[in-house]
Image (cartoon, grey):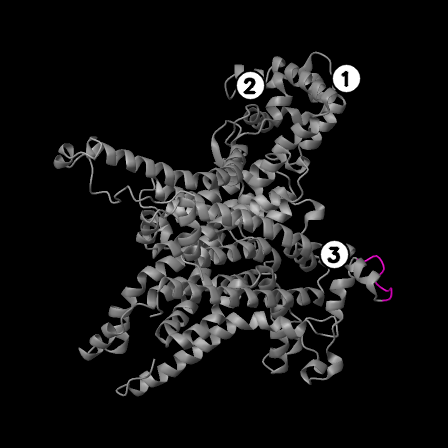
């Protein structure tokens, strides 16, 4: 195991820029500046060597897989690979060209090829992502592709007149190159119309932008509630004598260490319509048996459970900033005539700002990407963007769409992470 | 925080309101965790306190849900409870199988994360480390990146390299969980290295100790508390992780949280609460260990609590 050896004087001050260093030499006659530079380069290499295995590990098991997934969001060759003739026709003719006889001939050839290779379903699925209902158009047409005769235009349209739809041709043009931005467009509720111009999708199909906005808004709300609940508790912990605050700290740390699923389960037990809270309210006569409050499988459930799970992430950074604040400042303000509110607002609160920033950013970052709790207690209205990514991964199997949504979410999170590093510094992150 | 004698009546009222508010917030934090413990002894298949439970009638309580944890998935749950019955539990009971998987995956991913993470933390704490900030940002990012993105990426990556055909059981999940645990090891170990007195290692070197001896005799004992608490964090991260398992684990590699997820989604029964109770007990033990380590670390480094 390498470690810092005694032959290097650490510290950046000595270097070749020092005019005196050029004249000094080491015992074996080398210029001191060069010997030092060499020693420093060696210790830099050593430090890097210690980090290298882990860096390599994280690159392989984390960075590469995510990069590969992001690649999938712009690369989908299901159409281009299986429909080569049409791909060539699209490449030769600019956007807006009416599909001519050659185009239909290419289509017929590709459908026959798709029938032979049994790839019509794959191709249809790719187009179906953008125009629903077209998968069966491809599979049924491919089944009858061997009957197609020249002239192909009449023959193909006789098979199914949907082939004349200009929007279908527009989408096929978009899919005819393996690299496409159409999944990002779809993730932003945009599409290309018949002329190839970018337009918004119909009102009732705009789901993604709304969900992104909702995710950010809910995360902001959860962060706000966490701050309101966490601030007084952190303050109490910070001003109590250490022996007592350590005891109370257990109440914060135990939830922090308890399994996420256990906490989500407990909230399900508490919030159910036949659950503990409703039963208590009924028994106490606050509400009657018929009007039990629905607190779960909706947004309220998501908010309550997530606040509980993320609250320790707010309290701990606040506490570590509040603990060293000297109480004499507030006392001095009071003795100079400030009311307790003014002393709090003008003297105490500004000193806690670093903690508020660290806690809020951390909670917000974690909330934006939350998956498990919304999936279990969120119902239909309490779902966040992560849940939609999981839906595209597991149910609709539109993996390119999942990748595009994930890329946008990742961009948001990385921006916040960068902000966190700028304002607070990753090194200052503390645990427990 | 004693109330000063010059406090006005309004301040006195606020002082007590504030205390009550804090008590309520503490209740909000802890009550959901404690509530599952009595409910897991419910004799009825309900998620709420029955009248018998409230009147502390012993017949209102039972161990049937804990019993179900053992018998669920067994081949012959009704056989006589002798050695063969327990052998059946060990081999076939679903919850026992998932617990075994969780422990194996947790152990190996923790080992990997702790070994690599400690080495890297040693390098990152050196003043001459180049690109420190960016490398740190990359190594911490598994904690920040939404888990669904990590899981999705790993799903594609593992299927493209065919990791399941390599013949190493659990490999994919172990590597993924190690990645997720690494940030915790780095944060805790670099924290112990902040107060590290480098003249100790230099003194040892000047007295003729080899680098390996210096590490074993000087560095390791000092960073050990940080390593162990980092390892515990990594273990808990793995032990509690469900999304990656859901996406990449083979059917025979399911873990406790994955099975709980199934239980909550499909046949929710108080058996889930008995698992939850056991996990709460585990987290109490972990918390106690961490606390003891933290105090020991402070004592070793001479940091006295303020």
Q: Is residue A428 left or right of residue A401?
A: left
- Characterize the local packing of mark 3: few (<14), some (14-19) or many (20 or more) Cα atoms within 10 angstroms: many
Q: Can marks 1 and 3 be said to lie on one chain?
A: no
Tell me whether the residue at label 2 lies in contact with that at label 1, contact meaning CB atoms closer than 8 angstroms. Answer: no
Residue A113 in view in this figure: yes
Secondary structure of the residue carrying numbered label 3: helix
Secondary structure of the residue carrying numbered label 1: helix
Tell me whether the residue at label 2 lies in contact with that at label 3, contact meaning CB atoms closer than 8 angstroms. Answer: no
Task: Look at the image and give the residue range highlighted in magenta.
Answer: B74-80
Q: Nearer the viewer, mark 2 or mark 1?
A: 2
Q: Nearer the viewer, residue B38 or A207?
A: B38
Measured from the top left, where is residue A359 in percent x and y?
40, 60
Image position of A85 with respect to A222: above or below = above
**Looking at the rendered structure, which numbered label has been put on residue B94?**
3
Secondary structure of the residue carrying numbered label 2: helix
- Is residue B75 one of those drawn in magenta? yes
Measured from the top left, where is residue B90 in percent x and y?
76, 58
Residue at position x 59%, y 58% in the image: A378
* Disc 2: which residue: A90
**Looking at the rendered structure, which numbered label has been put on residue A147?**
1
Location of residue A125 by image quarter: top right
Measured from the top left, where is residue B70 in percent x and y?
76, 63
Image position of B112 with respect to A137: above or below = below
Question: What chain does mark 2 sit on?
Answer: A
Measured from the top left, where is residue B176 in percent x and y?
56, 45
């Amino acid at each position: 195991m390498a470690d810092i050896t005694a032959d290097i004087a650490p510290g950046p001050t000595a270097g070749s820029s020092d005019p005196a260093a050029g004249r000094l030499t080491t015992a074996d006659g080398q210029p001191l500046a060069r010997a030092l530079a060499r020693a420093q380069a060696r210790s830099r290499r050593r430090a890097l060597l210690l980090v290298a295995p882990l860096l390599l590990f994280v690159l392989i098991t984390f960075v590469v897989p995510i990069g590969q997934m992001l690649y999938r969001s712009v690369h989908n060759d299901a159409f281009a690979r299986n429909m080569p003739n049409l791909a060539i026709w699209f490449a030769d003719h600019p956007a807006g060209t009416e599909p001519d006889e050659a185009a239909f001939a290419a289509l017929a050839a590709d459908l026959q090829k798709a029938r032979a290779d049994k790839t019509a379903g794959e191709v249809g699925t790719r187009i179906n992502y953008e125009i629903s209902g077209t998968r069966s158009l491809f599979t049924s047409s491919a089944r009858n592709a061997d009957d197609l005769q020249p002239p192909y235009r009449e023959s193909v349209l006789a098979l199914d007149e949907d082939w004349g739809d200009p929007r279908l041709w527009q989408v096929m043009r978009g899919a005819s190159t393996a690299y496409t931005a159409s999944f990002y467009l779809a993730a932003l509720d945009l599409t290309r119309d018949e002329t190839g111009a970018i337009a918004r999708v119909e009102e009732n199909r705009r789901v993604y932008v709304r969900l992104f906005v909702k995710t950010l808004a809910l995360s902001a709300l959860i962060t706000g509630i966490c701050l309101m609940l966490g601030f007084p508790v952190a303050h109490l912990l910070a001003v109590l004598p250490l022996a007592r605050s350590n005891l109370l700290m257990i109440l914060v740390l135990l939830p922090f260490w308890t399994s996420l699923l256990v906490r989500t389960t407990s909230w399900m037990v508490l919030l159910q319509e036949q659950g503990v809270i409703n039963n208590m309210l009924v028994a106490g006569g606050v509400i009657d048996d018929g009007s039990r409050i629905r607190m779960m499988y909706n947004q309220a459930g998501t908010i309550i459970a997530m606040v509980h799970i993320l609250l320790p992430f707010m309290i701990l950074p606040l506490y570590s900033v509040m603990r060293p604040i000297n109480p004499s400042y507030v006392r001095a303000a009071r003795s100079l005539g400030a009311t307790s509110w003014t002393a709090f607002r003008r003297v105490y609160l500004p000193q806690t700002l670093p903690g508020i920033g660290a806690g809020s950013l951390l909670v917000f970052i974690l909330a934006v990407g939350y998956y498990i709790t919304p999936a279990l207690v969120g119902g239909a209205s309490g779902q966040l963007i992560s849940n939609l990514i999981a839906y595209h991964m597991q149910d609709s199997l539109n993996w390119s769409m999942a990748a595009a949504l994930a890329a946008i979410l990742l961009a948001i999170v990385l921006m916040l992470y960068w902000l966190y590093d700028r304002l607070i510094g990753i090194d200052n992150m503390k645990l427990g | 925080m004693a109330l000063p004698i010059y406090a006005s009546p309004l301040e006195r009222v606020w002082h007590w309101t504030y205390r009550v508010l804090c008590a309520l917030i503490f209740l909000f934090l802890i009550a959901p965790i404690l509530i599952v413990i009595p409910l897991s002894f419910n004799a009825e298949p309900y998620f709420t306190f029955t009248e018998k439970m409230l009147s502390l009638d012993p017949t209102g309580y039972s161990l049937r849900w804990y019993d179900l944890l053992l018998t669920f998935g067994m081949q012959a749950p009704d056989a006589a409870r002798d050695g063969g019955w327990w052998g059946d539990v060990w081999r076939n009971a679903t919850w026992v199988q998932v617990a075994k998987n969780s422990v194996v995956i947790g152990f190996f991913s923790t080992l990997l994360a702790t070994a690599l993470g400690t080495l890297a933390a040693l390098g990152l704490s050196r003043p001459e480390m180049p690109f420190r900030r960016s490398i740190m940002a990359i190594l911490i990012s598994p904690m920040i990146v939404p888990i669904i993105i990590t899981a999705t990426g790993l799903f594609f990556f593992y299927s493209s390299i065919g990791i399941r055909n390599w013949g190493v059981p659990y490999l994919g999940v172990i590597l993924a969980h190690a990645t997720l645990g690494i940030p915790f090891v780095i944060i805790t170990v670099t924290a112990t290295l902040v107060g590290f007195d480098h003249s100790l290692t230099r003194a040892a070197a000047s007295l003729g100790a080899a680098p390996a001896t210096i590490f074993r005799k000087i560095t390791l004992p000092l960073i050990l508390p940080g390593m162990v608490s980092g390892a515990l964090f990594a273990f808990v991260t793995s032990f509690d992780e469900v999304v990656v398992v859901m996406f990449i684990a083979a059917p025979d590699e399911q873990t406790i949280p994955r099975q709980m997820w199934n239980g909550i989604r499909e046949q929710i029964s108080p058996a889930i609460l008995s698992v939850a109770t056991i996990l709460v007990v585990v987290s109490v033990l972990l918390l106690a260990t961490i606390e003891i380590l933290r105090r020991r670390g402070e004592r070793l480094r001479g940091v006295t609590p303020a």
